[in-house]
Image (cartoon, rainbow, N blue to C red):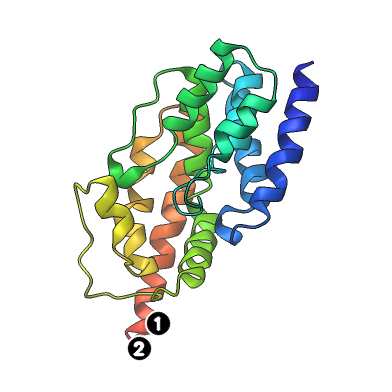
């Protein structure tokens, strides 16, 4: 039965993600799922809840949600889940978002796995690609070395200012390594973090005319 529910959910969300830009499309969901499976090789968790939460975690993302729309609720209610499962999945999803550094702490192992899996897809080579894909979709500058990265932002402040794509590294991506909560997530994040630092160093050299 759980397999059928996951397949039904997958069919419902795939169409939605295929309308998003490349930073949050269906490929993003598949990568997060693979990250979670790697982490679950080292952690005991309810894989059913993890997989459903991953499939659903961006369908109602504020960046894409239309006014009056609640696709997350619509899909969850269509899956025949128990009340407890619904609550647990919503709780996991609620702890995924960074929200300018003011996100909800992941309390359960399932939430920690999904949070780490999603954050791993925000860093490293794929994180770089996604950052510029989103920035391009929103018409943002590639870089602005004079722009001051913001700290201690509210969620509203984090979402409201269209900063350059490079500034986003300093406001979020470079912070994620130290916010991983699973051992496997921390290990994978280390290499990806170093790759981003190398990329930014090279980018600055090229844009300064020094390379």
Q: Residue at x 33, y 36 (%)?
A: 103
Q: Quadrant of the N terminus?
A: top right
Q: Which residue is mark 1?
A: 206
Q: Quadrant of residue 33?
A: top right
Q: Are marks 1 and 2 in contact (CB under 8 Å)?
A: yes
Q: Is residue 96 placed above or below 25 in the rendered structure? A: above
Q: Is residue 23 placed above or below 187 in the rendered structure? A: below
Q: Quadrant of the C terminus?
A: bottom left
Q: Secondary structure at mark 2?
A: loop
Residue 89 in the image: x percent, y percent? 54, 23
Q: Which residue is mark 2?
A: 209
Residue 117 in the image: x percent, y percent? 53, 37
Q: Secondary structure at mark 1?
A: helix
Viewer-closest of 91 and 126: 91
User: Is residue 144 left or right of 115 when viewed as pictured?
Assistant: left
Q: Residue at x 40, y 82 (%)?
A: 206
User: Is residue 170 left or right of 45 when viewed as pictured?
Assistant: left
Q: Residue at x 75, y 24 (%)?
A: 5
Viewer-closest of 37 and 152: 152
Residue 43 in the image: x percent, y percent? 56, 18
Residue 73 in the image: x percent, y percent? 56, 31
Q: CA distance from mark 1 to mark 2?
A: 5 Å
Q: Quadrant of residue 179?
A: top left
| Residue 90 visible in the displayed image | yes
Q: Name the residue furthest front.
A: 68
User: Is residue 152 left or right of 144 when viewed as pictured?
Assistant: left
């Amino acid at each position: 039965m759980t397999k059928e529910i996951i397949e039904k959910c997958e069919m419902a969300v795939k169409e939605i993600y295929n309308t998003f830009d490349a930073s949050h499309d269906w490929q993003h969901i598949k990568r997060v799922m693979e990250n979670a499976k790697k982490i679950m090789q080292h952690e005991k968790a309810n894989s059913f809840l993890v997989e459903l939460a991953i499939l659903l975690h961006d369908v109602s993302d504020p960046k894409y949600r239309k006014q009056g729309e609640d696709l997350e609720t619509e899909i969850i209610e269509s899956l025949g889940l128990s009340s407890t499962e619904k609550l647990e999945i919503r709780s996991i999803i609620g702890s995924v978002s960074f929200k300018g550094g003011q996100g909800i702490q992941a309390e359960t192992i399932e939430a920690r796995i999904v949070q780490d899996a999603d954050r791993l897809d925000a860093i490293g080579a794929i994180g770089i690609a996604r950052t510029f894909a989103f920035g391009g979709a929103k018409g943002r500058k590639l870089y602005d070395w004079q722009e001051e990265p913001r700290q201690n932002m509210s969620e509203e402040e984090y979402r409201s200012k269209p900063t350059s794509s490079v500034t986003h590294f300093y406001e979020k991506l470079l912070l994620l390594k130290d916010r991983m909560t699973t051992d496997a997530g921390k290990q994978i994040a280390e290499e990806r973090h170093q790759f981003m630092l190398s990329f930014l160093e090279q980018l600055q050299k090229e844009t300064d005319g020094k390379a």
